[in-house]
Amino acid sequence: MTTMQCTYRDHTIVADVREHPGMPQPWAGGCRITDPAGTTTRRLPLPVGHAFLAELEQAQRASIAHGKWLVDQCLDHGRALMAQAA
């Protein structure tokens, strides 16, 4: 499986999608974010209502988008991101 990642506002966002076989929507979206200093968060799952998706690529894209939103919240609104470091 290929891992989707991107660099956004000097942060590296990596999709951390987990498979749950046997479910109609088996892909649980989530991401890990590394800041410019090299600190990495724990796995940050998608919000509960949107956590499970039917397709891997869809889950990866949603995970990256969620990571970008979290970086924006951190940089633009002062929300702690690295308080959730691994």
Image (cartoon, helix red, strand yellow):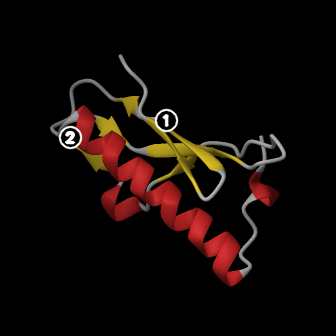
Q: Could you say which is closer to the camera, residue 44 or residue 77?
A: 77
Residue at the disc numbered 2: 25
Choose top left, top right, bottom left or bottom right for residue 9: bottom right
Residue 37 horizontal/vertical position (percent): 84, 46
Q: Amino acid at mark 1?
A: Asp
The image quadrant where one finds the C terminus is top right
The image quadrant where one finds the N terminus is top left
Q: Residue furthest top?
A: 1
**In the rendering, which numbered label is found on residue 54?**
none
CA gap between label 2 and label 1 equals 16 Å
Label 2 residue SS: loop
Q: From the viewer's perspective, is residue 70 above or below residue 73?
A: above
Number of the front mark, 2 or 1: 1
Residue 56 horizontal/vertical position (percent): 26, 33
Q: Residues within 10 Å of mark 2 (few under 14, many from 20)?
A: some
Compare marks 2 and 1 and give the one earlier in the sequence.
Answer: 1
Q: Could you say which is closer to the camera, residue 29 or residue 58?
A: 58
What residue appears at the point 25 percent right and 36 percent down from the top-left corner? 57
Q: From the viewer's perspective, is residue 57 above or below residue 79?
A: above
Q: Amino acid at mark 2?
A: Gln
Residue 22 horizontal/vertical position (percent): 21, 26
Q: How many marks on residues? A: 2
Q: Is residue 69 left or right of residue 71?
A: left
Choose top left, top right, bottom left or bottom right for residue 13: top right
Q: Residue furthest bottom?
A: 77
Label 1 residue SS: loop
Q: From the viewer's perspective, is residue 79 above or below residue 55?
A: below
Residue at the disc numbered 1: 16
Are circles 2 and 1 on residues that touch, CB within 8 Å? no
What residue appears at the point 65 percent right and 50 percent down from the top-left corner? 11
Q: Residues within 10 Å of mark 1 (few under 14, many from 20)?
A: many
Residue 52 horizontal/vertical position (percent): 30, 47
